[in-house]
Amino acid sequence: MNVSKNWEIAKEALSKNDSTMMKIIELYDSEKMQLKNNAFVTLVRSVVGQQISVKAADSVWKKLENLCSDDIQPDTINSFSEDELRSVGLSKSKANYIQNISKSDILGTNWSNLSDNEIIDLLCQIKGIGRWTAEMFLIFHLARPNILPLGDIGLIKAIELNYNNGEKISKDRIETYRQKWAPWCTVATWYLWRSLDPIPVNY
């Protein structure tokens, strides 16, 4: 199921089940997640965004786009050396990870017949892609509806701010929210991110 086609249904269900989520959704009622149709771009942008702020990731991404003349694809990435990739602000490891993705044949996979966990396992075979990056792929490229990336620092911060006055929150309590938001955890995640950042998260 592509959640972007069921966004309004998801908003209604989340608002009905969760008054706090309803208030967040009302603040950004005219907005929705924008998908990337390019699997390679989504993975590369997710690697760029690993463990840094949305603002920092956006800055590095724009520099990478300039380096690639707005043509970010495997052949273009493969034409640059590690040092050239690092010149846009990528760490040595991230430059290597992006090169690994550009040389992988996994991106030719037919994703439609695979479960979320099967896709995560497959993508994690590429060095540099962990569960978080795979989950960004599930959200922003495949629009799988029920992804809650609990390894995402921003998401946890948003949950704590909106549901626990900014205080630390237990995993058990977060699990109760997962159950409340299902089967639309992806949409809940997007709105929680949106509550933190002046620009929508987009991988």
Image: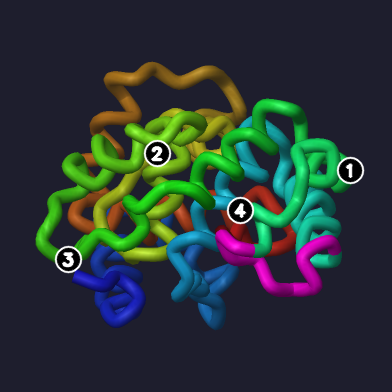
Q: Residues within 10 Å of mark 3 (few under 14, many from 20)?
A: few
Classify mark 1: helix, strand or loop. loop
Q: Amino acid at mark 2?
A: Pro
**Residue placed most toward the observer, 85 or 14:** 85
Q: Which residue, as the protein is rendered here, is positioned at the far right?
A: 87
Q: Residue at x 61, y 28 (%)?
A: 166
Q: Amino acid at mark 1?
A: Ser
In the rendered image, which quarter contains the C terminus? bottom right
In primary-sequence order, the first of circles 4 and 3 is 4
Residue identified by numbered label 4: 45
- Measured in 3D between alpha carbons, the distance from the residue under mark 2 to the one under mark 1, in whole angstroms, is 30 Å
Q: Quadrant of residue 81?
A: top right
Classify mark 3: helix, strand or loop. helix
Instruction: Name the spot of residue 159 as percent of width and height, x first.
Output: 49, 37
- Do the CB atoms of the residues marked 2 and 3 lie less than 8 Å apart? no
Is-magenta flag for residue 71? yes
Q: Residue at x 56, y 60 (%)?
A: 74
Q: Residue at x 38, y 33 (%)?
A: 131
Classify mark 4: helix, strand or loop. helix
Residue identified by numbered label 3: 112
Q: Residues within 10 Å of mark 2 (few under 14, many from 20)?
A: many
- Measured in 3D between alpha carbons, the distance from the residue under mark 1 to the one under mark 4, in whole angstroms, is 16 Å
Is residue 20 in view?
no
- Do the CB atoms of the residues marked 1 and 4 lie less than 8 Å apart? no
Q: Which residues are magenta?
A: 67-75
Instruction: Name the spot of residue 78 as percent of width and height, x first.
Output: 64, 53
Q: Of circles 1 and 4, which is in front?
A: 1
- Measured in 3D between alpha carbons, the distance from the residue under mark 1 to the one under mark 3, in whole angstroms, is 37 Å
**Residue placed most toward the observer, 150 or 14:** 150
**Residue placed most toward the observer, 193 or 28:** 193
In primary-sequence order, the first of circles 2 and 3 is 3
Question: Up-down: is 192 above or below 172?
Answer: below
